[in-house]
Amino acid sequence: MNLDTLYREEILEHWQNPQNFGKMRGADLVIEQVNPLCGDQVTFFFKIESGKIKDVSFEGSGCAISIASASMLSGVIKNKPIAALSKITGKNVLSLMGADKNSFPPARLKCAFLSLEAVRKIGQMQAD
Ligand code: ZN
């Protein structure tokens, strides 16, 4: 990985101690996302109130990049309006990890974007 040691340690820290980790009781929305290339699997749980992400949690298993990005992203989207979720870009997610698109090989970018794909589905559901 072409990353500063600081960020590499942060990714490992999030992987070992993910934030907002665990199943949520009474979730309004459950979205599962799988990355078959790497075997990563995350399930996001959302509580939605007045068009906002009132609470979010996730569970799953996968490589350090997939779990760390899920952990970091879950912290970012809490209390955000649903309309703001579609504005989160892959670049935003990478910058949370101190990375850019050149930091990981293409296969690992799939790992980094797994959670973002799940989060973006909410916006699509609301639009439907
Ligand atoms: Zn992965």
Image (cartoon, grey):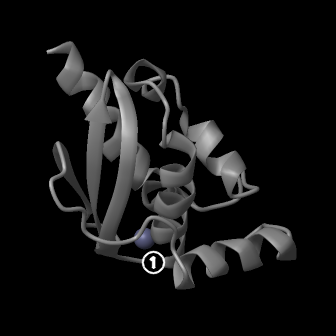
The reply, left or right, for residue 30 in relation to residue 91 is left
Q: In this rendering, is residue 91 above or below 14?
A: above
- Residue 32, quarter of the rendered image: bottom left
Give coordinates of residue 67: x percent, y percent. 46, 70
Residue extending farthest to the bottom is 16
* Residue with the mark numbered 1: 63
Give coordinates of residue 43: x percent, y percent. 25, 61
Q: Quadrant of the C terminus?
A: top left
Type of amino acid at the residue the image marks with label 1: Cys
| Residue located 63% across and 39% down the image | 92
Give coordinates of residue 57: x percent, y percent. 36, 59
Q: 28 or 87: which is nearer to us?
A: 28
- Residue 34, quarter of the rendered image: bottom left
* Secondary structure found at label 1: loop
Q: 110 or 97: which is nearer to us?
A: 97
Q: In this rendering, is residue 91 above or below 22?
A: above
The reply, left or right, for residue 89 in relation to residue 60 is right
The reply, left or right, for residue 27 in relation to residue 52 is left
Give coordinates of residue 110: x percent, y percent. 43, 55
| Residue located 28% across and 43% down the image | 47
Name the quarter showing ligand 1.
Answer: bottom left
Q: How many marks?
A: 1
| Residue located 76% across and 56% down the image | 98
Q: 99 or 20: which is nearer to us?
A: 20
Q: Is mark 1 within 8 Å of ligand 1?
A: yes
